[in-house]
Amino acid sequence: MATLRMVRPPAVAGMFYPADAGALERELAAYFKQGDVGVHPASVRGVIAPHAGYMYSGATAAAAYSRLRGRKFDTVVIVAPSHRDYFEGASVYPGDAYRTPLGDVPLDVEMRDALVKASEHVFAGEAGHRSEHAIEVQIPFLQMMLGSFAILPVVMGDQNRALCFALAEALDRVRGEKEVLLVASTDLSHYHTAKIADAIDSVTAEDIRSFDHRRLMEHLESGAAEACGGGPTVAVMGSLARLGAKKMEVVHHCNSGDITGEKQNVVGYLSAVAW
């Protein structure tokens, strides 16, 4: 008897992005055409990308993901915040695959099991995965750019300093000899005027440009910086430093008011690459 596969179905297809595969491919192709500068670092190791509906942040995400064109990775680690479930530590999906309209992407079960064993802060469970969008919206960009790959989807239930730094260390310890891409899923400040949002988000952007995850952690704790995925960003930046990355470049930065024209209550978006 065939083994039943546990696949995490799309939760926000038809809301955050098109549910039809053809329509999704066309929309992504348009974003990639808009964001493709034609020059890509040969050794991109990490991406920071937003997770809003594609009409708001799709172009921002594509500006970073377009730098992956032609690259191959064994596993993409996606670290995201939990918007709907609160729990201590970080969860990795216990099933076999994540599904999008573009197909199923398998989990790296070996790396998942190693991560759970490596850190007391990480467990295998569905908490943070059932209806969470922050990982799901990243996957179609990766499918368009990379073709075949596995994922390790990690959702942080809380974002305290100890967890962020411990997760960075654990991710470095379990990657082994695999070619791994690290992705942090985050939006920036929420519901300020555009002027205030840009001032707050400039702090986050500068910490990312400086490739300084410890200073970003300090700014998040003090309130000088705001990001719903600030913890995942700190963890991924810390792990990238351990991986040997030396530089980070912010490739796109905007806010929702740039799309809607409504400047009183905006959400900030940024994307970056590390190499």
Image: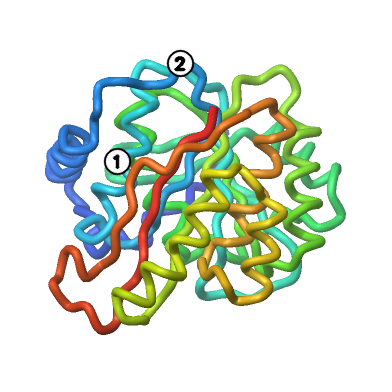
Nearest the camera: 9 or 25? 25
Is label 2 in a helix, a strand or a loop? loop
Nearest the camera: 48 or 119? 48
Please, is residue 179 above or below residue 220 in the view? above
Q: Is residue 54 left or right of residue 67?
A: left
Which mark is drawn over residue 42? 2
Q: Quadrant of residue 28?
A: top left
Pick the quarter of the image with the C terminus: top right
Q: Quadrant of residue 239?
A: top right
Nearest the camera: 50 or 248? 248
Q: Residue at x 52, y 37 (%)?
A: 248
From the top left corner, tell me how far across and down residue 74 is, in percent.
56, 22
Please, is residue 200 above or below residue 67 in the view? below
Sequence-wise, the earlier of marks 2 and 1 is: 2
From the top left corner, tell me how far across and down residue 209 is, in percent.
52, 44
Is label 1 in a helix, a strand or a loop? helix
From the top left corner, tell me how far across and down residue 258 is, in percent.
19, 64
Q: Name the residue under label 1.
A: 62
Q: Which residue is drawn at 48% across and 54% down?
A: 205
Which mark is drawn over residue 235? none
Tags 2 and 1 in contact by the CB under 8 Å rule?
Answer: no
Q: Which residue is drawn at 25% across and 67% down?
A: 256
